[in-house]
DNA sequence: GCGACAG
DNA sequence: ATCTTGTCGC
């Protein structure tokens, strides 16, 4: 397998990355409802790292949104393109994730990624970044609250509490399993927050984490081991 | 100035 | 993210 190279024009430091976010943030579209939850295709994307060898493996797994069965899978391996800096996560994964999505034979439909979209220090997290670059509808489902503080949602599945920034509800702490820690949902691009939450609930009939990310997580780890070994 | 901080 | 055994619980 070929190793994806870091784009020549990729940001070299934090200042350049901030400038890129500042330029791209204006292209985010959040007034489209997005695909109807439970229909069409849903694609999960995730990455695994090998800091020792400076490698990152990305996976894109397409599911039938109605049955949640796997329709197609694709992977890509690249060089780590940026250090981990809270708020600049996208610069670390985007090149390789784009390659994995491009390796898909069919369209991805809605893309679900780890991390945040609109709920971000500068309102431009990974999900929004990926959306603007691909033009696809994207949502972000994170496992941790990042810098946000939130009220505990009611105990039942489906309960939610707002993630607020500057008086705006930028995301939601959504309980996908009764009595279990919530996940943190935000719209990335061309999807509404309400729909992002509805999609998340459709994708979690059994576990806290969406089936899409569970599949993508397992696949990128396998892909990384395959080349490491 | 220090701490916290998606993955 | 990643390093890691056993262990509690359904």
Image (cartoon, coloured by chain):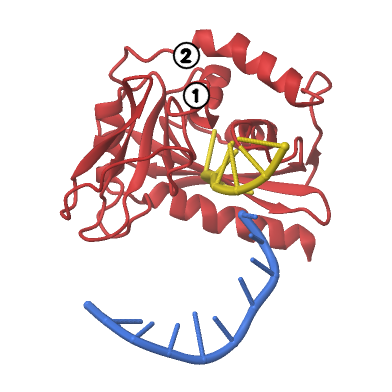
Chain colours: A red, B yellow, C blue
Is residue A81 positioned above or below A77 on the image?
above
Asked if A81 appears above or below A75 in the picture, the reply is above
The answer to whether A215 appears left or right of A165 in the picture is right
Kindly identify which numbered label has been placed on residue A194.
none
- Which chain is disc 1 placed on? A
Horizontal side, residue C6 vs residue A3: left or right: left
- Please state, as top left, top right, bottom left or bottom right, where the C terminus of chain A lies in the image: bottom right
Q: Residue at x 35, y 51 (%)?
A: A69
In which chain is the residue bearing label 2?
Answer: A
> Gap in Å between the C-alphas at discs 1 and 2?
7 Å
Q: Which residue is mark 2?
A: A28
Would you identify the image quadrant in which residue A193 lies?
top left
Q: Earlier in the sequence, mark 1 or mark 2?
A: 2
Which sits in the foreground, A162 or A62? A162
Q: Are marks 1 and 2 in contact (CB under 8 Å)?
A: yes
Q: Is residue A177 left or right of residue A189?
A: left
Give the crowd class for mark 1: few <14, some 14-19, many >=20 residues within 10 Å: many
Residue A158 lies left or right of residue A106; in this view the side is left
Residue under circle 1? Answer: A128
The spot of residue A102 in percent (x, y) is: 61, 31
The one of A159 and A195 positioned closer to us in this rendering:
A159
């Amino acid at each position: 397998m070929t190793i994806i190279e870091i784009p020549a024009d990729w940001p070299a430091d934090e200042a350049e990355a901030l400038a890129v976010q500042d330029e791209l943030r204006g292209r985010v579209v959040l007034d489209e409802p997005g695909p109807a939850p439970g229909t069409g295709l849903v694609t999960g994307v995730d990455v695994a790292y090998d800091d020792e060898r400076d490698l990152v493996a990305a996976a894109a797994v397409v599911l039938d949104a109605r049955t949640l069965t796997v329709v197609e899978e694709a992977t890509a391996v690249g060089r780590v393109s940026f250090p981990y800096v809270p708020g600049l996560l996208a610069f670390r994964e985007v090149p390789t994730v784009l390659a994995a999505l491009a390796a898909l034979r069919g369209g991805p439909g809605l893309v679900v990624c780890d991390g945040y979209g609109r709920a971000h220090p500068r309102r431009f997290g990974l999900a929004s970044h990926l959306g603007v670059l691909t033009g696809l509808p994207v949502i972000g489902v994170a496992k941790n609250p990042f810098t946000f503080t939130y009220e505990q949602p009611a105990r039942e599945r489906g309960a939610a509490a707002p993630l607020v920034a500057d008086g705006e509800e930028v995301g939601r702490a959504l309980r996908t399993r009764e009595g279990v820690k919530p996940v943190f949902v935000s719209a990335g691009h061309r999807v509404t927050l309400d729909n992002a939450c509805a999609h998340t609930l459709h994708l979690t009939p059994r576990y806290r984490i969406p089936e899409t990310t569970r599949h993508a997580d397992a696949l990128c780890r396998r892909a990384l081991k395959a080349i490491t070994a």
